Image (cartoon, coloured by chain):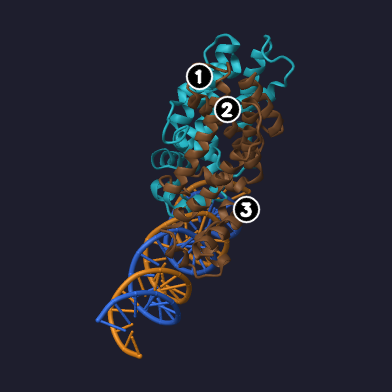
Chain colours: A brown, B cyan, C blue, D orange
Amino acid sequence: MGARTRLIDTAANLLAEEGVGAVTLRGIAKAAGVSHGAPLRHFSGRAALLSAVATRGYTELLDRGTGLPDGTPRERLIAACHGYLDFALANPAMFELMFRRDLIDPDDAELTRVSSAVFDFFAALVGALQDGDWHPGTDPRLLASSLWASLHGLAQLWLWGGLAGASFAPSPESALAVTLDAYLG
Amino acid sequence: MGARTRLIDTAANLLAEEGVGAVTLRGIAKAAGVSHGAPLRHFSGRAALLSAVATRGYTELLDRGTGLPDGTPRERLIAACHGYLDFALANPAMFELMFRRDLIDPDDAELTRVSSAVFDFFAALVGALQDGDWHPGTDPRLLASSLWASLHGLAQLWLWGGLAGASFAPSPESALAVTLDAYLG
DNA sequence: CGGTTTGATAGACAGTGTCTACAAGGTGAA
DNA sequence: TTCACCTTGTAGACACTGTCTATCAAACCG
């Protein structure tokens, strides 16, 4: 296994175990057992390394999508929504990294390729359901953007510290149920 | 005007003009014309200062709410949703800071007080609409959490770099229209 | 007046990303 | 073989960062 892959592995482990704040170039180098400057032989900088890590996150998300069980378009879309939320809750640090523009390189080729594929897949699920009589006439990508944003906000606010003030803390599942009910009726 | 207030002002200006990454203790001190250690005489650390800045953001958000024009519950709720999105798009750096748990102190008393007030206000708007025949029987705070998350995701994803892949970039207003249509019918 | 508190300063420290000079080892051509 | 070259890793330096501490000046107050 190449040193480059080993660095991404180490960084991903560090990310999962210690959080976004612990993923420093020097920390990764130490965890990988190399000198503090070694990672720069394989990545142009911290953002490039973290982009490679985030790309893994998007890849796993895409795999969750393509691995979805068969079913009606409606069932598949609902399962995908649950999958998005599940992924975020199961990998909070990775999820945070994936949307931290200051830590990754937004123009990274691999990253944009995979993240676009995730959105396209989700939009296709929406389009398939639309072939029924659900919201006909609306651009499926616009519909997908809106629904995705709702899921994303749910995940983000939950990870941020509960979905509401201190006086009330619904489970993410119950809030997702309300969201899906609003969109899918 | 006290030195403490002046520091918050300076930090808020720096935040708006240079972004979250520029809001360092030393940068704020330099912009305020004091030595690099001076801010620590008024705040226990960086997180405390940034919490005070973020509290201003929540306060402005609350003011936008209480300043809402009269109208039917439905009109007021829709206006509040637009207001939330408008605020985020008009103050992207402030909006980012307000939800960056690693930069602020989540237990800051003022911060939690004002942010909870924002949510309570929003939940009250939802509750008022519910007194009609909209989603009767559902906890208004659960409904508010779900709707708020949708707005939040919209704002977050838009600021993150468009609501979708590179191939498709809807305006936040059009996506919000879809969201409001889903929830409010 | 004297003592105390408050506010500000400058220096130090560890930690960060990044750059540069250098060394070790492999590769391939003369 | 021998030599040049490239890759990979190392160690040191630099400018940053947040935070701590010692010092100092001014204001306040009994």
Element on which disc 2 rests? helix
* Gap in angstroms between the C-alphas marked 2 and 1: 12 Å
**Can the viewer see residue A27 in this picture?**
yes
Element on which disc 1 rests? helix
Circles 2, 1 touching at the beta carbon (< 8 Å)? no
Q: Which residue is mark 2?
A: B150
Rendering coords of residue B52 (x, y %)? 54, 40
Element on which disc 3 rests? helix
Q: Chain of mark 2?
A: B
Rendering coords of residue A127 (x, y %)? 53, 25
Figure quadrant of the N terminus of chain A:
bottom right
Residue at the spot 69% in from the left edge and 27% down from the top edge: A177
Rendering coords of residue A152 (x, y %)? 57, 34
* Gap in angstroms between the C-alphas marked 1 and 3: 37 Å
Q: Is residue A177 above or below residue B130?
A: below
Q: Which residue is mark 3?
A: A16
Q: Amino acid at mark 2?
A: Ser
Q: Which residue is mark 1?
A: B177
Residue at the spot 61% in from the left edge and 57% down from the top edge: A13
Could you tell me how many numbered marks the image carries? 3
Specify the quadrant of the image occupied by residue B118. Answer: top right
